[in-house]
Image: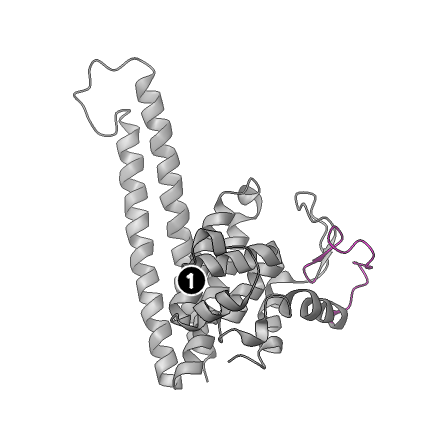
Amino acid sequence: MAKFNFDAVMKEVFAHEGGYVNHRADPGGETNFGISKRSYPKEDIRGLTRARAKFIYQVDFWDPIKGDQLPDGVDLVTMDAAVNSGKSRGVRWTQTAVGLPKAQIDGIMGAKTLAAIQKRDPIELVKKACAVRVGFLRGLKTWGTFGKGWSRRVASVEATGVSMAAQAEGSRGYTKGILSREAKQAEVLQKRNSDTGHITAAGGATGTGGVETLHDLPLWAPLVVVGVAVLIAIFFYGRSRHDAQRATAYRNEMEKVL
């Protein structure tokens, strides 16, 4: 169990949250170390110290998600998601990754969720939870503004989480082998999604998805086909970019394994 992982988890969280920012497109408003004025109106956000932020995270996030009872790696992906998108969502994404019935996906880290987590392979659970998280983030209206950074963050958290889970299970060599395997798989997916995006875009450029015999189509039909093809191509290009970020994150994580 990950009873002493809080400091290691917060090291990764802080690496992504950074210092003081006040981005006008961020619904949280003024933010420091990931602590937002919207969520903590009484805090001096600009003057917030790392120690104070860490205390807030332990009391208001780590303890509610039962971080000390989660397996290595699963604690990280649940905590980072909770910090970035709210405790309830962070837990829900882990619950979804576990495969709990819809009625039990309630955003609360209860006994049934903890029991179900213990029955799952932590490495696969880390990967699935991150995939669920990215899928949600892509649907947000602020994806266009923050998507690239969010995607990179989730890729890094996934790779670090897999590394933590692997190190808890085996040796240095075992961990590096797992990370190498995941990097190669991400590269394969990256190429596949990139190729699919290119094929879709090329088909849409013909106005009929590559079909040249639909003479009876109304004049507006080719425009619809092109529009749909563009949207699909963008989707696959986005997945390709995320897989490229995952591959890079896994290879970077391999270099950290001592």
Q: Is residue 30 above or below residue 157?
A: above
Looking at the picture, tell me which residue is in the foreground, 24 or 77.
77
Q: Amino acid at mark 1?
A: Val
Looking at the picture, tell me which residue is in the foreground, 238 or 89.
89
Q: Which residues are magenta?
A: 33-50
Q: Residue at x 28, y 47 (%)?
A: 195
Main SS type for the magenta part? Answer: loop
Q: Is residue 133 visible?
A: no
Q: Residues within 10 Å of mark 1 (few under 14, many from 20)?
A: many
Q: Residue at x 73, y 53 (%)?
A: 39
Disc 1, SS: helix
Looking at the picture, tell me which residue is in the foreground, 75 or 115.
115
Q: Is residue 226 above or below residue 191?
A: above
Q: Position of residue 92 (x, y in %)?
A: 52, 56
Image-quadrant location for residue 219: top left
Q: Position of residue 130 (x, y in %)?
A: 46, 59
Does the magenta run of residues contain 128?
A: no
According to the picture, the residue beneath numbered tag 1 turns out to be: 98
Q: Is residue 123 visible?
A: yes
Q: Position of residue 167 (x, y in %)?
A: 43, 81
Q: Residue at x 51, y 80 (%)?
A: 1
Looking at the picture, tell me which residue is in the foreground, 76 or 22.
76
State left or right for residue 91 relative to residue 196: right
Q: Is residue 213 above or below residue 21?
A: above
Image-quadrant location for residue 60: bottom right
Q: Position of residue 45 (x, y in %)?
A: 79, 58
Q: Residue most toward the left?
A: 213
